[in-house]
Image (tube, rainbow, N blue to C red):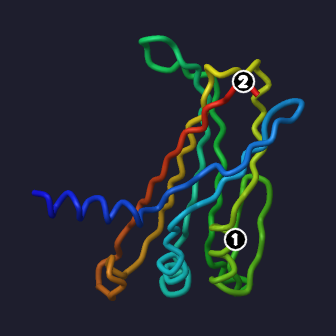
Amino acid sequence: MCIFFLHFLASNLNAFSLSIPYVQKEEQGFIFSVRYKNFPLQEVILSLKEQKEDVLLILEASLYERRFLLPGLFVKKLVYFKKAYFNPEDNAYRVDTEKTTLTFNSAEDAALFLVRSESYYFLFSEMLHERHFVVFKATLTYKTHLNPKLRYTSKLNTYIKNAETIYKFSKD
């Protein structure tokens, strides 16, 4: 039993996760810096290169108000996405975001754009105080013929990796 628990802990140490290293307050909202940890970069690059499958990264930010002895009260939700794919018409890789479409010559460059740290502007114009918190959820979805040990299989496998973190506002 102890061995299984240690294996569970070790596997979670290398799991896909995210962090919020920096927050800046603006007049109409906040700028949150989002950093992904243990991003499966090699698997995503191989998925784009070999199978020409789409890779989707969705970031959800939900604002809640903490209540005494009750679940948090949902206030607002914002969703951001990045979709990487191969476009055979111009023989290039593209990354669509909620605002623009970028073109890359290689799968490596497109995957690096997915994993890089981003700053997101959140229009939380409500009066925020220490009772508010934001739940960040990241979902990475990709398909590949590779198994978790990066060996080829005939079956197309779909992988969904989830990460979540909470940012609690302080009095500052």
- Which residue is at a point 64% across and 67% down the rendered structure image? 114
- Which residue is at a point 16% across and 61% down the rendered structure image? 4
- Name the residue nearer the viewer: 53 or 162: 162
Which residue is labeled 1 in the image? 113
The N terminus appears in which quarter of the rendering?
A: bottom left
* Residue 50: % across, % down: 50, 87
Q: Amino acid at mark 2?
A: Lys
Left or right: where 28 falls relative to 156? right
Which residue is labeled 2 in the image? 171
* Residue 34: % across, % down: 66, 53
Whether tag 2 and tag 1 are in contact, CB under 8 A, the answer is no
Task: Count neighbours of disc 1 (C-alpha within 10 A) and say few if under 14, some if 14 to 19, many if 20 or more.
Answer: some
> Marks 2 and 1, Cα distance to the nearest angstrom?
34 Å
Question: Height in image: 5 above or below 75?
Answer: below
Question: Height in image: 148 above or below 101?
Answer: below
* Residue 92: % across, % down: 71, 83
What is the residue that sits farthest to the left in this orientation?
Answer: 1
Image quadrant in which you'd find residue 15: bottom left
- Name the residue nearer the viewer: 88 or 122: 122
- Name the residue nearer the viewer: 104 or 27: 27
